[in-house]
Image (cartoon, rainbow, N blue to C red):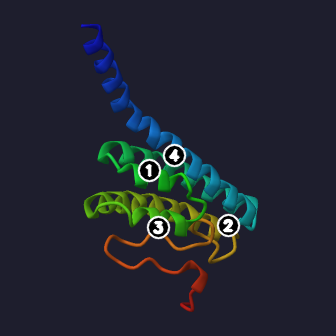
Amino acid sequence: MKTIMFVALLAAAGCSKKGSDCEVSIGQGIEGFAATIKAKAPNPQIQESKLGMLGKLRGTLTQRCTQDKWAPEVVSCFATVAAMKDLQACQQKLSTDQRTRLTEEIRGIMVTSMGARVSSDLAGAPAGSGGMGGEAAPAPAGSAAPDPAAGSNAK
């Protein structure tokens, strides 16, 4: 009987650990990403805006990871995120359904934050300084991720 209880306790701990793994790994990645933003943001207003967006992103990633039961390989990938290109690489490891749900939620965060950034741009922030770390937003599911190092010629 004691063996059965012990196995049941271990199983319960294993189930709850999934959420914990998501929180820990994503937390590590977000901390690395925040360090990148702090190092690259051209001014305190832009830094604050990007870090606010990053806070929302952390919650969304953790929620999607937990609810969608991401594979351990994907969870550990998100621990290494330090820039948008890293986030995009990890997203590519998700199943199509998982990636679609995550992309839709990230898009919502970006749209909400873009509205706030437009207001700050009108208040004098440099044009074209938006986005996370000055990089492109995550690519929609099924599309090729843009190369942030390539830059953009669009005006």
Hey, what amino acid is under mark 2? Ala
Residue 125, image x, y percentages: 69, 69
Q: Secondary structure at mark 4?
A: helix
Q: Residue under circle 1?
A: 75
**Circles 1 and 2 in contact, beta carbons < 8 Å:** no
Hey, what amino acid is under mark 1? Val
Closer to the camera, 47 or 22?
A: 22
Q: Secondary structure at mark 3?
A: helix
Hey, what amino acid is under mark 3? Ala
Q: Residue under circle 4?
A: 25
Q: Residue under circle 3?
A: 89
Q: CA distance from mark 3 to mark 1?
A: 12 Å
Q: Secondary structure at mark 2?
A: loop
User: In this image, 154 relative to 40: left or right?
Assistant: left
Q: Residue under circle 2?
A: 123
**Circles 2 and 3 in contact, beta carbons < 8 Å:** no
Residue 137, image x, y percentages: 49, 70
Q: CA distance from mark 4 to mark 1?
A: 6 Å
Sequence order check: which comes first, mark 3 or mark 1? 1
**Circles 4 and 1 in contact, beta carbons < 8 Å:** yes
